Amino acid sequence: MAGELFCGRGNFDCDRGSGTVLESGDPDCLGSGYGHSLSPSQTSLAVLFGSVGAVGFGGGWGNLCGDRGLARGGQWADQFGAGESPAGGGLDVAGAGPVKTFPLAVNLSCPWQDPDNGSQDLHIHQISKELGTTTVLASVSLTLKAGTISALLGASGSGKSTLLHLIAGILTPDQGDIILGRRSLLGIPIHRRRVGLVPQNRLLFPHLSVGENIAFGLKMQGINRPDREAQVVQMLERVQLAGFAHRDPRSLSGGQAQRVALARALVVKPRVLLLDEPLSALDAHLRQEMQELIRSLHSETHTTTLIVTHDQQEAVVLASHLALLHHGQILQQGSPTDFFYCPQSLTVARFFGGVNFFPAIAEGQRVWIHGIPFTLGTPFQGEGWVTIRPELVRVWQSPPSQINTLPMQIQQRTSTGLQWRLYLHHPCGLALQAWVSHPPSQEQVWVEFPPDALWMMPPETPL
């Protein structure tokens, strides 16, 4: 496979084991080693797929073919010891000078293999990262169970994508460790981690066909052409794009392009798959189709998967384990049920759609809200906030026999199509929402707060 250092001043042929290296690179030009120039983000993606590529960083060119690597600042270096570099050691050609040619011993089919055949859980341990003067992540710890789908939620700017880039190797943590199985990924080159990343903007290579995009990582691994083509056909069928191999990626719809990006990441059989906001740019019906596709592919591959999203409904549909990232810290992690019915803070409850919050004081299972006694399902001691999901509030047209009931007035009712949202008020000042499938015919109703549905949390700020 021949590739070029663009700007017209160098070339490299990995198959023949020889190449021409430009010692003083053009800071405005990046080459891919694939015969086309790429943007910096595309080059990072190419490296992630085990690419053979040339990369310039404003002062030097290097080739990421097999075991070759570029040290920033224009130096060639042997990253993996003697025997795989020119003359058995590292070769420094830093600084300006003429173009030189020398043989390179490279191996395109050398993905890093973990000797550990045991658990392949991914452990993020006390990871911290600063970008400039901003602390993006602060002592983040998270475990992804092997073969499961987990979701990392959070608002924009909470550090979700940064954590993905740290796992993939695009960024390096300031402290902490990332462990896959029993081996740290820190220091392992991007193309040897076997971590697949589907970025938010997909980044399909526009100069390659759909099939060539999907086959990109296989080609970098040295898979022969017939096998590559067979795997591409198979993968296109799995993502429901049979017959699309020769299509131009620029002609694809958003949903089709997302399927191609997913196929490209999965075809190289990564041990970990990272999906950065995979459905955010799709319409509602396409999001549902992609959710079904992701779950179907996962049931076939059992690839350990981490999905980054700001959409709690999407996370609940796809993942069995959730973690909420807020201002660079994990506020809570657990099952979807934990987040909906047992939130650990007001921030968590609000993020997951909570709308009913009342300051309260509790003694065991007895709690006072606006001076009115109620019974809690789970004991609590001291001041805090009581919440109840609006779907769990029960509305009666006559006094029920259950405990925790109050007469309340419906002040407003709104239909969402599938349910009615009732806005209720009590003379003591208590106001809440109840979401019901069938609205009552009268405005004066009785409202029940089931003890197991009432959940109390510690205060985030003094009451």
Image (spheres, rainbow, N blue to C red):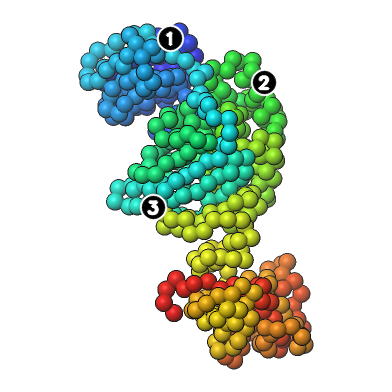
The residue located at (47%, 28%) in the rendering is: 191
Question: Is residue 166 something one can see in this rendering?
Answer: yes
User: Residue furthest toward the bottom?
Assistant: 427
Mark carried by residue 17: 1
The residue located at (49%, 31%) in the rendering is: 193
CB contact under 8 Å: marks 3 and 1? no
Query: Mark 1: which amino acid?
Result: Gly
Question: Viewer-nearest of labels 3 and 2?
Answer: 3
Mark carried by residue 245: none
| Foreground residue among 446 and 53 | 446
Measured along the vertical axis of the image, is residue 248 above or below residue 131? above
Measured along the vertical axis of the image, is residue 308 above or below residue 113? below
Spatial CA span between label 3 and label 2: 45 Å
SS for callout 3: strand
**Quadrant assignment, res 147:** top right
Query: Which is nearer the N-term, disc 3 or disc 2?
Result: 3
Q: Residues within 10 Å of mark 1 (few under 14, many from 20)?
A: few
Q: Residues within 10 Å of mark 2 (few under 14, many from 20)?
A: few
Measured along the vertical axis of the image, is residue 394 above or below residue 24? below
| Foreground residue among 300 and 431 | 300
CB contact under 8 Å: marks 3 and 2? no
| Foreground residue among 419 and 146 | 146
**Quadrant assignment, res 433:** bottom right
Residue 262 lies left or right of residue 420; in this view the side is left
User: Residue furthest toward the left?
Assistant: 96
Instruction: Tell me residue 1's x, y (percent).
Output: 49, 14
Mark carried by residue 138: 3
* Image label count: 3
